[in-house]
Image (cartoon, helix red, strand yellow):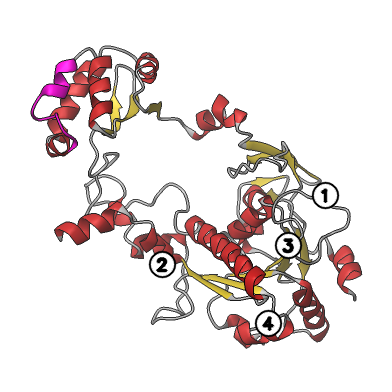
Amino acid sequence: MTDTASDRPSRGPLDGILVLDLSRVLAGPFCTFVLGELGAEVIKVEAPHGGDDARQYGPFVNGKSAYFMSLNRGKRSIALDLKAAADRALFERMVVRADVLVENFRPGTMEKLGYGWPALQGLNPRLVYAAVSGFGQTGPYRNRAAYDMVVQAMGGVMSLTGHGDGRPTRVGTSIGDIPAGLFTAIGILAALESRHRTGHGIAVDVAMLDCQIAILENAVARYVATGRVPGPMGARHPSVTPFEAFRAADGHLVIAAGNDALFAKLAEALGKPGLARDARFATNTARTENHDALKDALETLLAAREVKAWLGILDAAGVPCGPINTVAEALADPQVAARNMMVATDDPVAGRLAMVGNPIKLPGFADPPTRGPAPELDGDRAAILARFGS
């Protein structure tokens, strides 16, 4: 492990790992956000004019992007022109002392700058180099640009999302970018372990499209096994029943009775134990084949009470269930609060701002209720120059 700021206390298992973050917008910054939450020191290396594109994405608080702040809290920033000699010299000194470099340019961009993997490896043989891109470093699409929406569409996820009325529906969060950031973080951790064993860094190549294919799970299994192309099914699970949203007297709730024993508990809790003995519903396979009839039967029973009442009854019976929360309701949930999943940062421009916490809980490492603010563009130049030399 190399280089960490002397005034920063140990804050996670990656404390002492220095990450140079050349990425922007979401997939790369989300990766380095995760590494930072695990204790790594992250220095954003940004373009001098404008920096990370996400700085210009709303919503804004006192003129500063809440989107950018949420992904880049606790990082540091220096603006470098990697075509200028003095900035290149500083960047190379940083590379020599770094553990990890993350970028999400189109393939070939780092090579054009003179910083392809062989050049970086020559500067620092222990460096872990992670490149996350739309389509990866190889293949016929390697030079194509991609955003979240593009890979959601190309990777099959959009074809499974929504209802069967023919309208393409994007997943409500950036499922194209975020898994790519997570897989890149996992690749980096594996590469650091490899370095620990061998003494040498390696390159990590993650493609957003690959990650979409990787998370198709049940859809791939169904297609391979049956030859039938899966399509959108609304909230219903394709092979587990009942496992969807159901209407009660005043709204909807989710019930996920994932096996025969749970279905028997559900039938008992609804006051209709005979449902579990009905030949149409006695096994998961039968329930899935007769899902429309089962849904009608369940919603007839659920119509007798309000959502809140059923949630109490079903939870007491041991049946997995839950309300369909808005974002506001989810963030206000006492379980979310108990897990410290909403933290705050005190930003000198935006003031106090609530943000999501770290879902990875590690005994022995602090999970404080506050985090450091996101950096201003080039806001840490003086400290970085003092550390790496001007």
Q: Are marks 1 and 4 in contact (CB under 8 Å)?
A: no
What is the C-alpha distance between the residues marked 1 and 4?
29 Å
Tell me the residue that label 1 is attached to: 9
Tell me the residue that label 3 is attached to: 17
What is the C-alpha distance between the residues marked 1 and 3?
13 Å
Q: Secondary structure at mark 4?
A: helix
Q: Name the residue rendered at 36%, 22% in the picture.
A: 318
Please tell me how crowded label 3 is: few (under 14), some (14-19), or many (20+) other residues with Cα within 10 Å: many
**What type is the residue that disc 4 sits on?**
Leu
Tell me which numbered mark, 2 or 1, is placed earlier along the sequence: 1
Tell me the residue that label 4 is attached to: 120
What is the C-alpha distance between the residues marked 2 and 3?
27 Å
Residue 16 visible (yes or no)? yes
Q: Which quadrant holds residue 360? A: top right
The residue range painted magenta reads 273-284
Position of 287 compared to 78: left or right? left
Query: In the image, is residue 31 part of the stretch drawn in magenta?
Result: no
What is the C-alpha distance between the residues marked 3 and 4?
17 Å
Tell me the residue that label 2 is attached to: 210
